[in-house]
Amino acid sequence: MKNVLLTSAAILTFASVASAFEIAPGLSAGADVVAAYTVDAADMTTVVTPILSYGWNNLTLNASTDLSVWNNGWVGHETFDVQPSIDLEAILAVQDDVELSLETSYDLEAADRGEITLTATLSF
């Protein structure tokens, strides 16, 4: 349990440092760090998701991938043993409370496109 607490503290510290930064007008890069601990199975995992975004008017384009860095031990060195899957997303803000999004992925290892999903979101 002590290792879990220390690892969680380190992840939270790293996550607070990782924030999006603007590369050029409308183009930004950032990352999400998600740490999960399953109590019953006593499993600790951490996934880093770098995100590249481009925003223009009401349209936002995102490209990201998941990189596993911890799975009950350091696995960051195994992350690039296989080519990653790239997640692609386009979000159009129709109004302040209505969004349309189009999502897909492309697996570089299998050279195959994933399912295309069109989503409409109404926020209230």
Image: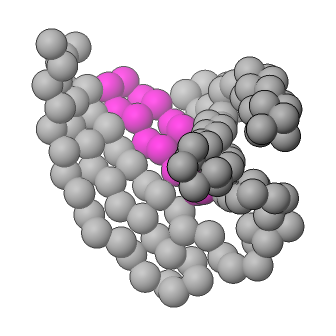
The spot of residue 98 in percent (x, y) is 16, 24
Q: Quadrant of the C terminus?
A: top left
* Residue 62 vs residue 16, the one in the foreground: 16
* Any part of residue 42 in sight: yes
Residue at screen point 54% across, 38% down: 53
Residue at screen point 84% across, 59% down: 74
Residue 101, quarter of picture: top left
> Is residue 4 toward the left or the right of residue 54 in the image?
right
Q: Quadrant of the N terminus?
A: top right
> Is residue 124 toward the left or the right of residue 32 in the image?
left
Q: Is residue 36 above or below residue 78?
A: above
Chain part drawn in magenta: 51-66
Residue 97, quarter of picture: top left
The spot of residue 84 in percent (x, y) is 62, 70
* Residue 79 vs residue 111, the one in the foreground: 79
Residue at screen point 74% across, 67% down: 79
The spot of residue 46 in percent (x, y) is 68, 48
* Any part of residue 21 in sight: no
- What secondary structure predominates along the stretch shown in magenta? strand
Q: Is residue 39 magenta?
A: no
Residue at screen point 78% across, 31% down: 5
* Residue 43 vs residue 62, the one in the foreground: 43
Total marks drawn? 0
The spot of residue 96 in percent (x, y) is 22, 14
Q: Is residue 81 above or below residue 102?
A: below
The image's colouring method is one colour
> Is residue 88 toward the left or the right of residue 58 in the image?
right
